[in-house]
Image (tube, rainbow, N blue to C red):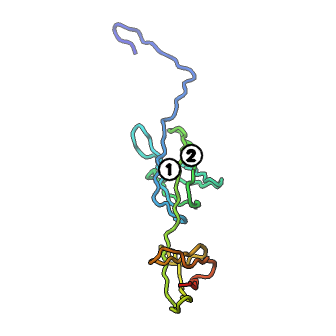
Amino acid sequence: QGNEIYNTSYALLDNVQVTGRLSQLQINTLNNTLHNTTINIQAIDPVTDTPIANAPVTITLPNGDVINTNTGASGIVTQKLDLPVGQNTITIDYPGNEHYNKTNIEYTVNVAPRASTTTAVVTNKTIRNTTLTVTVTDSQTGTPVTRGSITVIDSATGETVATAQITDENPVTITTNI
C-alpha cells in the first residue's frame, strides 16, 4: 500500500514451494532383556524441542519384520520388540506430514540374556556316587529353563566334577565322582 510519498506496488511470486520443518527421532532403551526388550520413540521438532503428536512411525527389525505404530497425542510411543540376544540394529522411519519433513534413524539395541536362578539339593551323599538334583528357573517368571548347560564345580579344588545338559527335563539329576 502506498503513502503520500510512494505509490502502491506489488510483487508477484510464482512457483513458491514451502518446505516442512525439520523433524527428529529420539530413541531410548527401557529394557534390553530377551523377551522383554522395550524402547521409547519420540518424534520431535528439533528447533522448538516440542513433541510431534500422532506421528506414524515404522520400525524395521533386523529380520525384515515391520512394526507400524503411532506416537499418540504425547509424541511418544513405547514399543516392545522381539529381538534375539546380541546387538540388533533396527531402522525407525517417520514419513513426515504437511508440517514436518521425513526422517529416519538406525538404532542398535544390545539384547541381554535373561537372568536365571539355580538351586541344587544333594540327594545321595555316598562317596564317589554323590547325586545332586539341580533346578534352573527364569529369575523373573520362575518357569523352568528348558535348555542349557550345568557345570558342577568342587569349591575346594576349583575343578569341574560333573556337567549336564538341560533339555525338557528340569530338574536334572547329576551324579558326581566326589
Which residue type does callout 2 highlight? Asp
Q: Indicate which disc, 2 or 1, sits on the residue closer to the N terminus.
A: 1
Q: Secondary structure at mark 2?
A: strand
Q: Residue at x 48, y 74 (%)?
A: 158
Foreground: 50 or 130? Answer: 130
The residue at which mark 2 appears reads as: 93
Foreground: 133 or 146? Answer: 133
Q: Secondary structure at mark 1?
A: loop
Foreground: 97 or 106? Answer: 106
Is 73 on the left-hand or right-hand side of 175?
left
Which residue type does callout 1 highlight? Asn
Give residue 169's quadrant in the image: bottom right
How many other residues sit within 10 Å of disc 1, few (<14), some (14-19) or many (≥20)? some
Q: Residue at x 58, y 73 (%)?
A: 149
- Give the image location of residue 29, x and y in percent: 47, 55
| CA gap, disc 2 and disc 1 | 14 Å
The residue at which mark 1 appears reads as: 54
- Give the image location of residue 35, x and y in percent: 55, 66
Rendered view: 145 above or below 106? below
- Give the image location of residue 124, x and y in percent: 53, 92
Q: Residue at x 55, y 59 (%)?
A: 81
